[in-house]
């Protein structure tokens, strides 16, 4: 099935969770926020949130500075 990760189409097997997608694409566990279809997903829920066909996942990186 196809999902979107930061506007790039990715093919993943059915049953893939946010945690699996993040791990497979080298997303660090710290310093990032993840939104699924526009809703922020707490890190504690990554392993229990399944992705479905067409899901849009956005990974935002924390940036310091001013």
Image (spheres, helix red, strand yellow):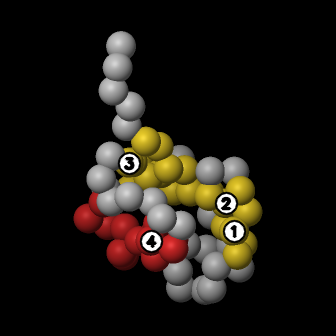
Could you tell which of marks 2 and 1 lies nearer the N-terminus?
A: 2
- The residue depicted at 61 percent of the width and 86 percent of the height is 14
Q: Nearer the viewer, mark 4 or mark 2?
A: 4
Determine which residue is flagged by label 2: 4
- Which quadrant of the structure image shows residue 4? bottom right
Determine which residue is flagged by label 1: 10
Q: Where's residue 27, x and y in %?
A: 45, 60
- The residue depicted at 44 percent of the width and 52 percent of the height is 34
Q: Nearer the viewer, residue 10 or 48?
A: 10
Circle 4: element type: helix
Circle 3: element type: strand
Determine which residue is flagged by label 4: 23
Dots 2 and 1: beta carbons under 8 Å? yes
Q: How far apart in space, not on screen, are marks 3 and 4 (Cα)?
A: 13 Å
Q: How many marks?
A: 4
Determine which residue is flagged by label 3: 32
Q: How far apart in space, not on screen, are marks 2 and 1 (Cα)?
A: 6 Å
Could you tell which of marks 3 and 4 lies nearer the N-terminus?
A: 4
Q: How far apart in space, not on screen, are marks 1 and 4 (Cα)?
A: 14 Å
Q: Is residue 33 left or right of residue 7?
A: left
Dots 1 and 3: beta carbons under 8 Å? no
Dots 3 and 2: beta carbons under 8 Å? no
Near mark 3 (Cα within 10 A), the count class, few <14, some 14-19 or many ≥20, is: few
Quadrant occupied by the C terminus: top left
Near mark 1 (Cα within 10 A), the count class, few <14, some 14-19 or many ≥20, is: few
Q: How far apart in space, not on screen, are marks 4 and 2 (Cα)?
A: 15 Å
Q: Where's residue 1, x and y in %?
A: 71, 79
Q: Is residue 53 left or right of residue 19?
A: right
- Which quadrant of the structure image shows residue 55? bottom right
Q: Where's residue 25, x and y in %?
A: 53, 67
Circle 1: element type: strand
């Amino acid at each position: 099935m196809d999902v979107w990760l930061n506007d790039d189409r990715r093919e993943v097997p059915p049953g893939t969770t946010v945690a699996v997608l993040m791990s497979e694409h080298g997303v660090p566990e710290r310093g990032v926020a993840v939104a699924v279809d526009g809703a922020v997903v707490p890190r504690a829920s990554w392993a229990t949130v399944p992705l479905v066909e067409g899901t849009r996942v956005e990974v935002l990186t924390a940036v310091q500075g001013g």
